[in-house]
């Protein structure tokens, strides 16, 4: 089942002994960051939720492969730390370049949306952003599904009813933290699926999952400035990273 395979792929694609450990974990207002012993850095959306105990007292000092297992935790603060550690491994400029990754600002760039129904899981359609209502004018229909719905949004529970009818589904990578992503992938398996946002792991092995065609994630370019900026307030990460898109093999 995709429920199991998504996380298995991320974990199993890390070599057993990378020689790397987690050097720092920084919890910001909206983002959690992990820095590895070689200086590489990854981020994930910070998701509140510590109703159950942590798997690990701290990820700092743990080998990367072990620390990454925290992504499976139902302590969602810890799961975000685990995903950030995974992204510090996968979302490196040299690694994504080796897999043909290209820099882009929009998860829809280059996709033919004419006459198609598009579902957005996460509130990513906005004026002044990379995906605007004007950009979607050629689509047959589009809608937003949100855990915290704004006017016009559907609640995320509508995923069960709406996603199977979509031609294209664009999903926030933060769904990997709260564990809703595998079910979203199952519901969207007959659509073209794009995962987008700084929380996305740029792991090409994920393209083995049905329907997944695009990974649009972030490569941190200004580590220390980013770590300082995210702590006091919710910040967009654009000034501190470049957005990279990996495409599934044809």
Image (cartoon, rainbow, N blue to C red):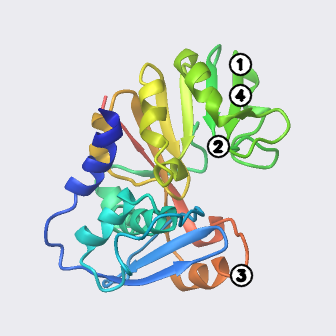
Identify the residue position indicated by label 3 in the image.
232
Under tag 1, what secondary structure?
A: strand
Mark number displayed over residue 54? none
Inter-mark Cα distance, 2 to 3: 24 Å
Which residue is depicted at the point 60% across and 45% down? 106
Q: Which of pointers 1 and 3 indicates the residue nearer the eye?
A: 3
Q: Which of pointers 2 and 1 indicates the residue nearer the eye?
A: 2
Looking at the rendered image, the quarter that the N terminus falls into is: top left
The percent position of residue 82, horizontal first and vertical second, equals 39, 66
Callout 1–callout 4 Cβ contact below 8 Å: yes
Inter-mark Cα distance, 2 to 1: 16 Å
Inter-mark Cα distance, 2 to 4: 10 Å
Identify the residue position indicated by label 2 in the image.
122
Under tag 3, what secondary structure?
A: loop
Q: Could you tell which of marks 3 and 4 lies nearer the N-terminus?
A: 4
Callout 1–callout 3 Cβ contact below 8 Å: no
The residue lying toward the viewer, choosing from 116 and 80, is: 80
Instruction: Check the image and report above or below for 126 versus 224.
Output: above
Q: Does the image show residue 188? A: no
Classify mark 4: residues with Cα within 10 Å, few (<14), some (14-19) or many (20+).
some
The percent position of residue 31, horizontal first and vertical second, equals 59, 68
Identify the residue position indicated by label 4 in the image.
143
Inter-mark Cα distance, 1 to 3: 38 Å
């Amino acid at each position: 089942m995709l429920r199991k395979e998504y996380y298995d792929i991320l974990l199993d694609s890390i070599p057993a002994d990378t020689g790397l450990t987690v050097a720092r974990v920084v919890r910001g207002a909206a983002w959690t960051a992990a820095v590895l012993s070689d200086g590489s850095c990854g981020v994930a959306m910070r998701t509140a939720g510590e109703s159950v105990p942590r798997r690990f007292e701290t990820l700092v000092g743990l080998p990367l492969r072990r620390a990454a297992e925290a992504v499976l935790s139902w302590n969602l603060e810890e799961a975000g730390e685990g995903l950030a550690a995974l992204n510090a491994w996968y979302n490196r400029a040299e690694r994504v370049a080796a897999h043909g990754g290209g820099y882009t600002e929009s998860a829809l760039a280059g996709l033919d949306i004419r006459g198609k129904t598009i579902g957005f899981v996460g509130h990513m359609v906005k004026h002044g952003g990379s995906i605007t209502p004007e950009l979607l004018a050629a689509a047959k229909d589009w809608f937003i599904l949100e855990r915290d719905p704004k006017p016009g949004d559907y609640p995320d529970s509508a995923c069960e009813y709406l996603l199977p009818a979509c031609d294209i589904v664009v999903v926030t990578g933060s769904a990997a933290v709260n564990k809703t992503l595998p079910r979203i992938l199952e519901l969207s398996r007959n659509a073209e699926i794009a995962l987008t946002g700084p929380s996305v792991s740029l792991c090409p092995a994920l393209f083995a999952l049905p329907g997944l065609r695009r990974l649009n994630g972030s490569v941190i370019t200004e580590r220390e400035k980013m770590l300082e900026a995210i702590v006091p307030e919710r910040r967009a990460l654009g000034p501190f990273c470049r957005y990279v898109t990996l495409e599934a093999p044809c």
